[in-house]
């Protein structure tokens, strides 16, 4: 049986283990809220080159909340993988997502701006990983 | 001007900063040896889910050394980005690459096997990150 990604179930299984997951499997994975409603999907990961850590998963939320498609950088810690839903769950309320840092397609933020990163972490109450190194 | 990836130079610039790089930019990036010879390209990253760290970059080496295409998981630390080459450089000799752990397409290793991970790190003299957490 071949999945919509073109990979067989066996190949999918080999791409995700207890501890390791392939980047090309993360991209495109659906994202749900705590109520199990689909919000969107993972667009890409932002990786800290020096430390080799995943700093953010950028979520594409398509037309959610009456907005056009928008991209929300979420700290990796905010995501939980749900094996039943076969997707990530972000335990954020509608209000939290409405106010969250986001950008439109073609209007990518200046990732070099540490104040921008700080604003994300301030919002989610997490710590910028780059500053911990 | 649009690159072969379909992104404009401006979009490319926004995808790579001093500290952060997008996962979809890493995938497909060429890989060179210390002499500047192209060896292959990045196929995907293997990410430690719990710690959110990039454990390995899996390199696809196409027909290199007279072998068929093979996939080499390299510890992230082994890679250096070269801005002139616009690719990663792995400072490994031909002999080191010939003996390195690798697999063929469709014959992906059992990533859950810690002994497999240990064999990679033993080869490159690095430390499995999952064991450091």
Image (spheres, coloured by chain):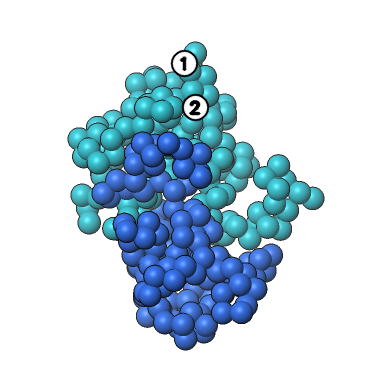
Chain colours: A blue, B cyan
Residue at 39 percent of width and 63 percent of height? A88
Locate residue B58, reporting x and y percent: 43, 37
Q: Secondary structure at mark 2?
A: strand
A21 relative to A101, above or below: above
Locate residue B16, reporting x and y percent: 58, 56
Q: In the displayed orientation, state which residue is furthest to the top.
A: B66
Q: Secondary structure at mark 1?
A: loop
Locate residue A29, reporting x and y percent: 46, 56
For disc 1, the chain is B
Residue closer to the observer: B115 or A10: A10
Q: Is residue A94 visible?
A: yes
Q: Which mark is residue B67?
A: 1
B35 relative to B89, above or below: above
Identify the residue under disc 2: B61
Residue at 34 percent of width and 41 percent of height? A13
Residue closer to the observer: A84 or B103: A84
Residue at 42 percent of width and 68 percent of height? A32
Locate residue B65, reporting x and y percent: 48, 16
In the image: residue B40, left or right of residue A51: right
Residue closer to the observer: A37 or A25: A37
Mark 1 vs 2, N-terminal side: 2
């Amino acid at each position: 049986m071949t999945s919509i990604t073109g990979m067989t179930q066996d190949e999918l299984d080999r791409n995700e283990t207890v501890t390791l997951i392939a980047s090309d499997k993360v991209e495109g994975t659906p994202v749900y809220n705590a109520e199990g409603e689909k919000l969107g999907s993972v667009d890409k990961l932002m990786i800290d080159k020096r430390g080799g850590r995943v700093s953010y998963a950028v979520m594409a939320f398509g037309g959610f909340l009456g907005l056009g498609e928008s991209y929300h950088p979420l700290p990796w810690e905010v995501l939980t993988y749900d094996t039943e839903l076969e997707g990530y769950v972000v335990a954020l309320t509608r209000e939290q997502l409405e106010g969250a840092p986001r950008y439109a397609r073609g209007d990518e933020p200046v990732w070099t701006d540490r104040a921008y990163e700080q604003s994300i972490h301030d919002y989610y109450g997490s710590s910028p990983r780059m500053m911990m190194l």
